[in-house]
Amino acid sequence: MKKTILTLLVCIITLTSYSQDKDKRERFKALKVAFITERLELSETEAQKFWPIYNAYDKEKDMLRHTAREKRHNLKLESLTEAEAKKALIDYLAFEKEQQNLKADLIESLLTAIPAKKIILLKIAEDEFKKQMLEEFQKRKEKYKKN
């Protein structure tokens, strides 16, 4: 546990030393990979099968989220007609279904690479990682406000 926290802290400090967005995203992904690998205790063989599946899922999830974000930003609420609002809701439901399908596909694919128990641990690890990152960002935000 101490090793995990220490590794995470070192990675976070490293993350802060880079100012470009692309570097930050890459550092963030590296932190996530290290965190998930450690939490799942992936063997070398499991990791070789797991990461290509997970990375493809993550890329698809990001593309889906980006598309949905663009659609939301293009909505002009003040001039939105009822028909446009209904279409936006249909698009939202389609996005939600696509996310669910993506998750289902991930689980099916991962079952060929790692045990089911580790797939459950993956969800827990992802949630823990998000929580730790949000806490770290909150601390930085508070520190920034004080300075």
Image: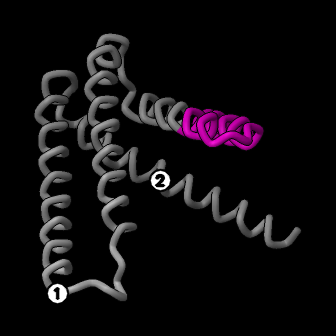
The correct choice, above or below, for 26 with respect to 47 in the image is below
Q: Which mark is residue 39?
A: none
Residue 112 image point, x, y percent: 13, 23
- Which residue type carries mark 2? Lys
- Residue depicted at x 20% and y 72%: 88
The answer to whether 97 appears left or right of 62 in the picture is left
Q: CA distance from mark 2 to mark 1?
A: 37 Å
Residue 43 image point, x, y percent: 35, 16
SS for callout 2: helix
Give the magenta part as a residue range.
Answer: 1-28
- Which residue type carries mark 1? Glu
Can residue 1 be seen here? The reply is: no
Q: Quickly name the residue at label 2.
A: 130
Q: Quickly name the residue at label 1.
A: 82
Q: Is the C-beta separation of discs 2 and 1 under 8 Å? A: no
Q: How is the image coloured?
A: one colour
- Residue depicted at x 30% and y 21%: 52
The answer to whether 139 appears left or right of 59 in the picture is right
Q: Quadrant of residue 87?
A: bottom left
